[in-house]
Amino acid sequence: MSRRLAKVAEAIRESISTSILFKLRDPRVKNVTVIRAEVSGDIQHAKVYISVRGDEKTQALSLQGLNAARGFLQKNLAERLQTRYTPLLTFELDRGVQLAAQASAILNAVLPDSNLAALTADSSATDNSMTDDEVNASPEEAEQANEPSATSEHESGEPVVSSTGIINSPMTETS
């Protein structure tokens, strides 16, 4: 895809997305996310891929509402694009988000709970919450607290990254 077509596709995605969100008043169209747009080489046709949260019935209703509002959306698109031709819009459901959610559910069912507990323990160990003393400290005290000390070493001998991004690696003596 050329750079021009990519820019037009992005402009179509933005325009359709804002039109659906702020201007479209069809009650059938709700929980719709515009994922991407594909434009033909002559910019006369555009496929707009959408994702709809909900069951099959909700997805079908939203797609029906978008097809009914196609002329309105094309008019808004024509004001935004300012090209010789306004692309004819076709809407398609993008199953990528739905398939990703299904894959995540399968992985959660397959992985044992002990692995999930270990992952949550790791994430809570890296929590950067501050104590009351750190919150109420003056800027100078906070700076001094964040500065690495020259004598501190990590127990495992691995480099330590402070909250300021400074890497503290233990010094090894060479004789």
Image (cartoon, rainbow, N blue to C red):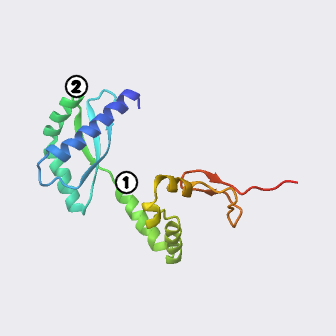
Instruction: Name the residue located 37 percent from the left edge and 33 percent from the top edge.
Output: 6
- The residue at which mark 1 appears reads as 96
Q: Which mark is residue 82?
A: 2
Marks 2 and 1 close (CB-CB < 8 Å): no
Which of these two is toward me, 121 or 154? 154
Which callout, 2 or 1, points at the residue further toward the start of the chain? Answer: 2
Q: SS of the residue at dot 2?
A: loop
Tell me the element at label 1. Answer: helix
Instruction: Tell me where residue 26 appears, x and y as whole percent.
Output: 11, 50
Residue 73 at x, y = what percent?
Answer: 17, 39
Q: From the viewer's perspective, is 60 left or right of 47?
A: left
Residue 127 placed where, x, y %?
49, 65
Q: Give 80 or 165, whichever is nearer the viewer.
A: 165
Mark 2: few, some, or many residues within 10 Å (few <14, many ≥20)?
Answer: few
**Residue type, numbered disc 2:** Gln
Q: Quadrant of residue 68?
A: top left
Q: Amino acid at mark 1?
A: Gly
Give the quadrant of residue 103.
Answer: bottom left
Q: Which mark is residue 30?
A: none
Q: Measured along the vertical axis of the image, is residue 4 above or below residue 35?
A: above
